[in-house]
Every structure is written in structure tokens, then in C-alpha cells.
Image (cartoon, rainbow, N blue to C red):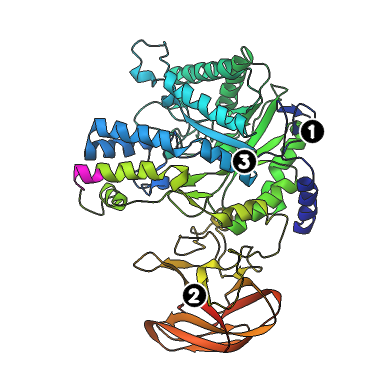
């Protein structure tokens, strides 16, 4: 589907009630529908990092899996204090406030990545082999999430993200310990997985706000070379399909109604060898990261939907720029496919909510990754507990640009002011980083605006080189005091700033900028020369004409290798 056609299709979807549903979700042909038979486009976020921590979400990617991260914490502060941190983390990371805000933004679903150890013991720690110990506190935490979801009209999708033993060679995803048998190498791990799903289904069988059961997240296992591949070259995937069939049969023994969500090998995308549909209420999930957002990128899964006669769902995507988010959502919704992005929050800049580091956390990171000295136990504990407190919604940093890219931009290509600006008799300061909301070529232009490394076969490409403040291509850095400014502003790039003026008139505009090598920028068609130096320069342009009502100032890099922009100040000409 061409992008223009996709926008027309999206307009129809958004003008209908396709996003909002009533009652049980179910499969009807190749669509997910609600009780009334109305098609439902699922729009959701995954709660990555809550019950299962991946190192990169805490800036501990080099440490790896959650059990390794936990071991580092124990080394720092001891077992008791580590347990206190994890209790605080679980209590704070996701609360009713998060779910309520998701509903206000327009999400109608949430995917819960479950670590099995929240609900049962690992097989090698069971007091009696083959007899499962259940953690009621973990089930009660899911109960609370379901209650919040129900109260806010959001479907909760249960996702077994870390299965007993771990389901792949991408270790951090499932907190897998490669020294122990994987899910695929242990019949007992498989038995426990089936028992866990049976327990969940029995508990939630009568809950219509459970949207579905996502059986095994991202299997990534090469059966020909166990421990070495991710299953992308597998041609049959017999074990992957067999286990999901066994899980489905066990669920149907206690729960005949909820949707079953199946994932292929190779991080959810290898559907080779898929047997004929074994359940009438079954959805096929695919995951999409770092590739192009064109019809070719989803052609195989769309074809499978038609041939297989079951709906498809983009069960996980994200970790990219706003341009990529907008284009991916426009693409899949244009094909009537729902989506779930990843994650709702983490330490980082490219998701709806950011967890602030707090004091001392980076000292822990430096030590844990071999880049710094070991912090003292009390200092480390204080930093850990501050991070846990900062995980709460009321302490999160909201990212309006990300939400705008997900919900407005796929159907409205116009720029929109990042903050409302009404110029009057008092001076008005516009921070350079507060350029308009909108996509590349509309609100700004930058040489790099997304990461396509899966498609290009190249390195992961940063879009915002400073990885802070906003998730567009504009490169943003911070001064020593934390103040953000636009950096790496190079020839050909530009930013737009919308504002309202009360009447026709002329204003003086003072731009604070700098360039170590010297350079030339322009406001509209009026050029400004920056002398070489490391200090901020304040350069004024008199008699900048504004019309009554809506206006836009556009700042261009005319000849820059290293220009940096702090702000623009407007005041009426005397």
C-alpha cells in the first residue's frame, strides 16, 4: 500500500470506532472483533522492564540478563537490600496511574511481559520434582493490573516473556542461564510452562478484559545447532509448533473463550512449517524492528494472514525514532493490523515515559560494566531505591513527541507547536529544542531520522546523537547544568517554530548560537554569521515581520559543520 493510500485508510479507521471495543475479543475470519462483531484495532504498549528487567533498559546492557544484574546488586548491597529494591521496583514501576494515562492517550491494550519466576519456582529449585510451587503474590499483582485495565477500558494481554529455562539464545529477553537446560532442552521446563498457562487460564477464564494469551514470546532457537543460532534458518520449527499446540490444548481444557496468540521462531517471525490452524480463536503475532516501513517489510505476514485464515497482530515493535513509529503505525493500520510497541517506560528517550536516573545510578553502572570503582554499600542502596522511586508515573518524564508520533502524525501530517506560544508585549524566549511536533520534512529536517540497520545491514544508526530530550532526528545535547540545546546542526538541516502573534508587526529576534569552527545560519531568508569560538553568541535580527495569528519561524543551517543553537528571544521592535 502506498503511503498516501495508507493515510486515507487510516482516516477511515480513526473516524470509526475501530479503536474502542466492548466485551470479549474473538477471532472472526482474519479480523479481531468484539462482542458486537465490530473489528478492533489494538493499539498498545508493553510493560517491559517491570516483571522482567533487560539490562539495556537500566543502562546495564553489558551485564546482560536479570539474574546477572541481580547478582551484581547483591554483591553491592547484600541479599536483603536487593530484595527491598525489587519489591519497591515492582510496586512503583506500573501503577493505576500508568494505565489511566495510557487510556487518556488513546491506547486500548497493554501487554504484560511475565517472568515465570514471579509465579512459580524454577524446576531446579522445586522442593519436590514435578510438583509446582505457586507464588500467590505474583498472581495478585496481575489481578491488580487487570483491575486497573478493566477500570480504564484497556485489554490486558498476558505474555510469557521468560519461560522456564528460557526460549532462546538472545539471553536477556528471557533471563536465560546458558549453563542450564533451555525450554527446548528440558521436558520438565516444558511441563512447567504448560502448567503455568493452565493456572493462568483457570484464574482468568471469566475475565473479558483479558485480551488474549501470548504463549511464548520471541522463540529464537536453532535446533540444528543448539545454543548458537536464533532459529531464522529453521525450515520446520516442529518443536516450536508442538509446544504451542500442547499449551493451547491445556488452556482449552479450562478456558474455551480467550484468544490464543502464537509466535514463530526467529524472534516471532519464522513461520515455516506452521501446521494447519489448531484453534478457531487463534492470532498470529509478528515483531518488527529496525527495518523499512514499506509494503515489502510486511508482505510475507500479510500473505500468511490470507492463506492461513487467521488475524495477524504486530505484537512488539519500537526502540526507534518518531519518524519510524509514525511510518510503522501508518503501514500496519493501513492493512487493518493492530500493534503493541515496546516499552512504555525505561531509562532512555524514545518511549512515552522516561525513568530519571537519579543521583548515583551511573556510578553503579560504571562499576557493573567495569568502567569505575565499586560504590559503597549505603551509597549504592540509596541510588537503587531512588531509581525504584523514580519508576513511579508521577516521577516519570513524559514524552509528548512520542505520543504525537503514535497517534496524531499517522493521520495528520501538519506541524504542531511543541508548546503554545503567544507573543505579546513581553519578550518571548523559544528554546531551540522546542521546535514543532511533526515528522521530518514537516517540523524539522535532519540528515538521519531513524535506524534501519536490519534493512541496510549496517551499524545501528543514532538519529538524535545526544539520545536525550526528544526522539526526532534533531541532535540534542546538554550543558553541564543539564539544560538541553540543539547540537550537531549541520548544513541543510532546519527546524520550525510555530507561534501566534496578536497583530501584524515587527519583532526583534535574538538568537543564541555558537560554532567552534564558525558557520552560517539563517532565520527565514536572513543569514547570520557565527564567528569561530566556544562561547555562546547573541546575534539580533531587527524587523522580523509577523502576521496576525499563526506564524512560523524556520531556522536553517546554511554552512555549518558544528553549529549549536540554544534559544531564540523575540520582543517587539521599539
Q: Viewer-nearest of labels 1 and 2?
A: 2
Dominant SS of magenta comes to helix
Vertical position of residue 398 compared to residue 547: above or below: above
Work out whether residue 56 or residue 353 is closer to the camera in this orientation and state it: 353
Residue 138, given in percent of the width and then of the height, sits at 44, 24
Label 2: few (<14), some (14–19) or many (≥20) C-alpha neighbours in 10 Å:
some
Tag 3 secondary structure: helix
Residue 335, given in percent of the width and then of the height, sits at 75, 45
Q: Mark 2 highlights which residue?
A: 567
Q: CA distance from mark 1 to mark 2?
A: 49 Å
The numbered disc on residue 393 is none
Vertical position of residue 141 compared to residue 427: above or below: above
Q: Which residues are magenta?
A: 375-380
The numbered disc on residue 103 is 3
Quadrant of the image occupied by residue 63: top left
Q: Mark 1 highlights which residue?
A: 38
Vertical position of residue 349 compared to residue 384: above or below: below
Can residue 232 be seen here? The reply is: no
455 horizontally vs 392: left or right: right
Circle count: 3
Tell me the residue at 57%/39% (across/down).
Answer: 100
Q: CA distance from mark 1 to mark 3?
A: 20 Å
Quadrant of the image occupied by residue 279: top right
Q: CA distance from mark 2 to mark 3?
A: 34 Å
Tell me the residue at 47%/67% (across/down).
Answer: 476
Q: Residue furthest front?
A: 425
First of labels 2, 3 by sequence position: 3
Amino acid at each position: 500500500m502506498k503511503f498516501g493510500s495508507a493515510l486515507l485508510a487510516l482516516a477511515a479507521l480513526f473516524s470509526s470506532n475501530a479503536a474502542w471495543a466492548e466485551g470479549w475479543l474473538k477471532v472472526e475470519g482474519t479480523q479481531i472483533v468484539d462482542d458486537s462483531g465490530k473489528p478492533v484495532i489494538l493499539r498498545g504498549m508493553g510493560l517491559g522492564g517491570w516483571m522482567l528487567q533487560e539490562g539495556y533498559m537500566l543502562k546495564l546492557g553489558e551485564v546482560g540478563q536479570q539474574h546477572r544484574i541481580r547478582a551484581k546488586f547483591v554483591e553491592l548491597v547484600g541479599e536483603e537490600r536487593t530484595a527491598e529494591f525489587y519489591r519497591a521496583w515492582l510496586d512503583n514501576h506500573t501503577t493505576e496511574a500508568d494505565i489511566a494515562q495510557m487510556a487518556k492517550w488513546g491506547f486500548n491494550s497493554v501487554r504484560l511481559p511475565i517472568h515465570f519466576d514471579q509465579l512459580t519456582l524454577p524446576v531446579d529449585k522445586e522442593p519436590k520434582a514435578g510438583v509446582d510451587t505457586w507464588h500467590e503474590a505474583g498472581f495478585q499483582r496481575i489481578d491488580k493490573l487487570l483491575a486497573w485495565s478493566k477500570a480504564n477500558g484497556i485489554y490486558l494481554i498476558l505474555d510469557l516473556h521468560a519461560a522456564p529455562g528460557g526460549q532462546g539464545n538472545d539471553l536477556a529477553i528471557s533471563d536465560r542461564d546458558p549453563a542450564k537446560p533451555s525450554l527446548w532442552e528440558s521436558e520438565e521446563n516444558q511441563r512447567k510452562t504448560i502448567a503455568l498457562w493452565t493456572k493462568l487460564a483457570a484464574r482468568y477464564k471469566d475475565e473479558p478484559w483479558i485480551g488474549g494469551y501470548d504463549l511464548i514470546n520471541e522463540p529464537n532457537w536453532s535446533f540444528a545447532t543448539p545454543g548458537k543460532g536464533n532459529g531464522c534458518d529453521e525450515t520446520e520449527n516442529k518443536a516450536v509448533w508442538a509446544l504451542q499446540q500442547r499449551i493451547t490444548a491445556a488452556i482449552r481444557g479450562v478456558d474455551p473463550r480467550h484468544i490464543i496468540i502464537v509466535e514463530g521462531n526467529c524472534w516471532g517471525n519464522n513461520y515455516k512449517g506452521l501446521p494447519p490452524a489448531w484453534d478457531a480463536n487463534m492470532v498470529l503475532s509478528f515483531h518488527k524492528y529496525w527495518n523499512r516501513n514499506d509494503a515489502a517489510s510486511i508482505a510475507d505476514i500479510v500473505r500468511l494472514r490470507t492463506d492461513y485464515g487467521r488475524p495477524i497482530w504486530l505484537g512488539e515493535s519500537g526502540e526507534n525514532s518518531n519518524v519510524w513509529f509514525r511510518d510503522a503505525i501508518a503501514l500496519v493500520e493501513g492493512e487493518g493490523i493492530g500493534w503493541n510497541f515496546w516499552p512504555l517506560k525505561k531509562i532512555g528517550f524514545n518511549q512515552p515515559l522516561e525513568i530519571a536516573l537519579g543521583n548515583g545510578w551511573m556510578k553503579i553502572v560504571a562499576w557493573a560494566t567495569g568502567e569505575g570503582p565499586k560504590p559503597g554499600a549505603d551509597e549504592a542502596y540509596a541510588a537503587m531505591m531512588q531509581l525504584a522511586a523514580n519508576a513511579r508515573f508521577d516521577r516519570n518524564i513524559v514524552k509528548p513527541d512520542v505520543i504525537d508520533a503514535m497517534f496524531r502524525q499517522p493521520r495528520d501530517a501538519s506541524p504542531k507547536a511543541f508548546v503554545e506560544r503567544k507573543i505579546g508585549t513581553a519578550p518571548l524566549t523559544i528554546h531551540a529544542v522546542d521546535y514543532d511536533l511533526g515528522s521530518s520534512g514537516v517540523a524539522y529536517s535532519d540528515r538521519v531520522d531513524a535506524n534501519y540497520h536490519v534493512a541496510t545491514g549496517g551499524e545501528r544508526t543514532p538519529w538524535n546523537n545526544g539520545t536525550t530530550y526528544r526522539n526526532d532526528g534533531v541532535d540534542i545535547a546538554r550543558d553541564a547544568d543539564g539544560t538541553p540545546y540543539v547540537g550537531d546542526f549541520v548544513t541543510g538541516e532546519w527546524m520550525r517554530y510555530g507561534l501566534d502573534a496578536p497583530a501584524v508587526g515587527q519583532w526583534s529576534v535574538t538568537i543564541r548560537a555558537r560554532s567552534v569552527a564558525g558557520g552560517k545560519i539563517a532565520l527565514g531568508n536572513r543569514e547570520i554569521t557565527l564567528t569561530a569560538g566556544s562561547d555562546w553568541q547573541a546575534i539580533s535580527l531587527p524587523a522580523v515581520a509577523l502576521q496576525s495569528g499563526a506564524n512560523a519561524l524556520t531556522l536553517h543551517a546554511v554552512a555549518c559543520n558544528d553549529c549549536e543553537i540554544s534559544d531564540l528571544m523575540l520582543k517587539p521592535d521599539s
